[in-house]
Image: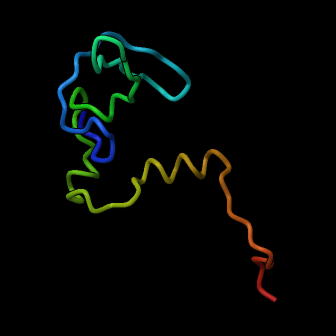
Amino acid sequence: MTHPFHPLSGQQLVCVGERYNRYGTRLLLRVDNERVCSVPRQWTDIVAPDPEVVIGKGRGLVRVADLGACRAGGATRRTGASASPA
């Protein structure tokens, strides 16, 4: 587990399967004899590190791909004031 804020970060877990949903592939990792957790592939060392994170040395708050996904998803922020000039 490589995600810095996950409670299991730094631990080596056994992958027991994969699941697919509309957000992508999730890995099923065995935590102990009773528990299996589901995490995105990007939170593990199975995939290569994101080049934006490597180049930015982990300093970026968001990735360009994430910003594009927000825009494509119609996520907008509205304020009470009009955006057009007076």
Q: Position of residue 81 (x, y in %)?
A: 79, 79
Task: Using the rendered view, name the quadrant where residue 14 is placed.
Answer: top left
Q: Position of residue 60 (x, y in %)?
A: 33, 61
Task: Using the rendered view, name the quadrant where residue 79 is placed.
Answer: bottom right
In the depicted view, which residue is nearer to us: 82 or 59? 59
Q: Name above or below for residue 65 compared with residue 80.
A: above
Q: Position of residue 5 (x, y in %)?
A: 32, 47
> Is residue 67 toward the left or the right of residue 60 in the image?
right
Residue at 64%, 45% (x, y): give it. Answer: 73
In the depicted view, which residue is nearer to us: 71 or 2? 2
Q: Name above or below for residue 52 compared with residue 86.
A: above
Q: From this viewpoint, which residue is outermost toward the bottom?
A: 86
Residue at 21%, 56% (x, y): give it. Answer: 55
Q: Name above or below for residue 39 compared with residue 32.
A: below
Q: How many marks?
A: 0
Q: Position of residue 67 (x, y in %)?
A: 50, 54
Q: Name above or below for residue 5 compared with residue 19.
A: below
Task: Using the rendered view, name the quadrant where residue 7 is placed.
Answer: top left
Of the 4 image quadrants, the one containing the N terminus is top left
In the depicted view, which residue is nearer to us: 31 or 5? 31
Of the 4 image quadrants, the one containing the C terminus is bottom right
Residue at 75%, 77% (x, y): give it. Answer: 83
In the depicted view, which residue is nearer to us: 10 or 76? 10
Q: From this viewpoint, which residue is outermost toward the front?
A: 34
Residue at 47%, 49% (x, y): give it. Answer: 66
